[in-house]
Amino acid sequence: MFLPENIDLAQTEKYTLSIRLIPDGFSFSIHCPTDNNVFYYKTTLFNNKLSYIENIKRLIFDFDFFTQTFKTTQVMVVSKEYTLVPETFYEEKKTKEIFNFNIATKNETVLTNKVAENDFYVLFAMDDELHSFLLRSLWNPVFTHHISQLLSYFCGHNHETKEKRCYVNFHEELMDICCFRQNKLLSANTFPISEKLNALYFIVGIWEKLPMDQSTDFLYVTGNTDSQKETIDALKKLIKRVEILSFSPELMVSEEKISPVPLDIKIQLCE
């Protein structure tokens, strides 16, 4: 694996390393918070000859720069299994009990992120062995769930409008749907969309359930929208206010390099 010449691995303490654990692979980015010219993003899909954990161990061992001392090391879990708990009801000692009430865990560590904008916690799980390995191998890693990044950003976007807002983020074979009324979170879900038009079914279902108004409320579509052109065209016939939401961090690199970067990583780049 060849990194750009402007990334000096003898000075990793200047950079932020972001690792993203996706269902069938692993991606990472390296950037310098003080130099917008320094950015690299790479995705690797795993083969089926090794288990998920064995594939990650092999990557970490083969490319030892992952274990070096970075300014910040972030590990993001991308999954549809998470639970949102209002701060009023959150108890640290009962996180696994609360998580298991909604989603059964097996040999997993339950982790939490606080989303300050809405005063609630995101509870999510990681395999015990993988969590332990990454704690041992990486430099002081911070574990987050991808939905935590999205909720913080969506909450602040166009939050002054009185109409409800629905955000749909396409990535990998998943889709996040997050709905708000001003700063109040109405719902947040992540669905698999491997089947054609699954996305349309889930979006329409949530609009009916909340309910949202097809004439006045907003639908913002973001992420890998090119993969869902048929779905978006159908939505435009059903909902009046449909907009493609683009997000571009202030990096001095080509659009070709930024385009494939998932939204949650782009948001991290602006922190």
Image: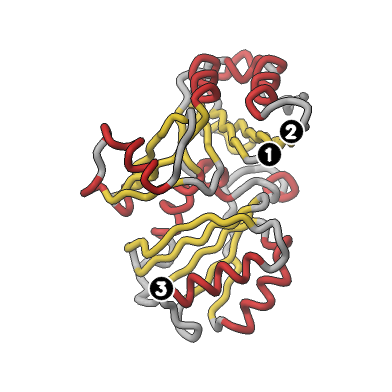
- Real-space CA distance between mark 2 and mark 1, rounded to the nearest whole angstrom: 6 Å
Q: In this view, does 147 lie to the left or right of 50?
A: left
Q: Which of disc 1 and disc 2 is earlier in sequence?
A: 1
Disc 1 residue crowd, few under 14, some 14–19, many 20+, Cα 10 Å: few
Q: Are the residues tagged 2 and 1 within 8 Å (C-beta)?
A: yes
The residue closer to the viewer here, 18 or 5, is: 18
Name the residue carrying label 3: 210
Q: In which quarter of the image is residue 236?
A: bottom right
Q: Quadrant of residue 37?
A: top right
Q: Which of disc 1 and disc 3 is earlier in sequence?
A: 1
In the displayed structure, 64 sits above or below 244; it is above
Residue 25 visible (yes or no): yes
Disc 3 residue crowd, few under 14, some 14–19, many 20+, Cα 10 Å: few
Q: In this view, does 192 lie to the left or right of 76?
A: right
Q: Which residue is drawn at 51% across and 61% down?
A: 177
- Real-space CA distance between mark 2 and mark 3, rounded to the nearest whole angstrom: 38 Å
Number of residue marks? 3
In the displayed structure, 97 sits above or below 216; it is above
| Residue 196, percent from left and from top | 72, 65
- Real-space CA distance between mark 3 and mark 1, rounded to the nearest whole angstrom: 32 Å
The residue closer to the viewer here, 260 or 36, is: 260
Name the residue carrying label 1: 24
Amino acid type at image mark 2: Phe
Residue 8 visible (yes or no): no
Amino acid type at image mark 1: Asp
Name the residue carrying label 2: 46
Q: Is residue 117 left or right of residue 197?
A: left
Q: Is mark 3 on a helix, strand or loop?
A: loop
Q: Quadrant of the N terminus?
A: top right
Q: Residue at x 58, y 72 (%)?
A: 243
